[in-house]
Amino acid sequence: MKVELVRVDDAFHFEASGSSDATVHIDGALDIGGHNAGVRPMELLLMGLASCSAIDVVLILKKQRQQITDFRIVAEGDREKEATTERKPYRTMHLHFKLTGVGLDEAKVNRAIQLSMEKYCSATAQFESTAELTHSVTIEEAGS
């Protein structure tokens, strides 16, 4: 895998691209001279974790003919400063899955999430040795 990061302006705005035609804008906060023209790097890590798991879960549930009408994940992470550095890695990361559908089987949804978190999602494998990963789920019937 390979990505390219290109500086867009004379401050902290960057554009990243990979093997797809899509681009991602990354920028620094206003207080360091950024322009809020993109997401922060640490937000990208949470987005990557959530989207990796989301693809797994949707793929598994589609194969099981589960009808999803809305799918969301709220990803939260707590960071802790490392002693003698300025680094603040994630120490906990929590994914809250919110699914709406027609007749969603709760057991199938929970199993799909468990398979993603423990077997399929490479992002969870990347973080599990340095952060506590947890998840929760809310399932709602469409039209309720």
Image: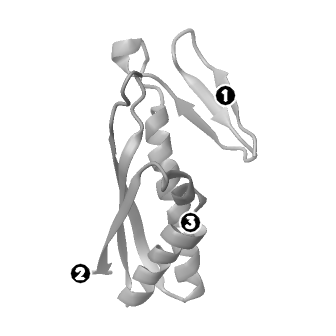
**Residue drawn at the location 46% of the way across and 48% of the way down:** 130
Q: Which mark is residue 144?
A: 2
Quick check: 92 left or right of 126? left
The CA distance from mark 3 to mark 1 is 24 Å
Q: Secondary structure at mark 3?
A: helix
Which kind of residue does numbered mark 2 sit on? Answer: Ser
- How many C-alpha atoms fall within 10 Å of the one at disc 3: few (<14), some, or many (≥20)? few
Q: Nearer the viewer, mark 3 or mark 2?
A: 3
Which kind of residue does numbered mark 1 sit on? Answer: Leu
Quick check: 42 left or right of 5? left
Nearer the observer, 38 or 54: 54
Q: Which mark is residue 5?
A: 1
The CA distance from mark 3 to mark 2 is 25 Å
Which kind of residue does numbered mark 3 sit on? Answer: Ile
Residue 105: in sight, yes or no? no
**Residue drawn at the location 61% of the way across and 19% of the way down:** 8
**Residue drawn at the location 41% of the way across and 50% of the way down:** 131
Q: Give the x, y percent position of residue 85.
A: 41, 22
Report the residue marked by disc 3: 55
Q: Secondary structure at mark 1?
A: strand
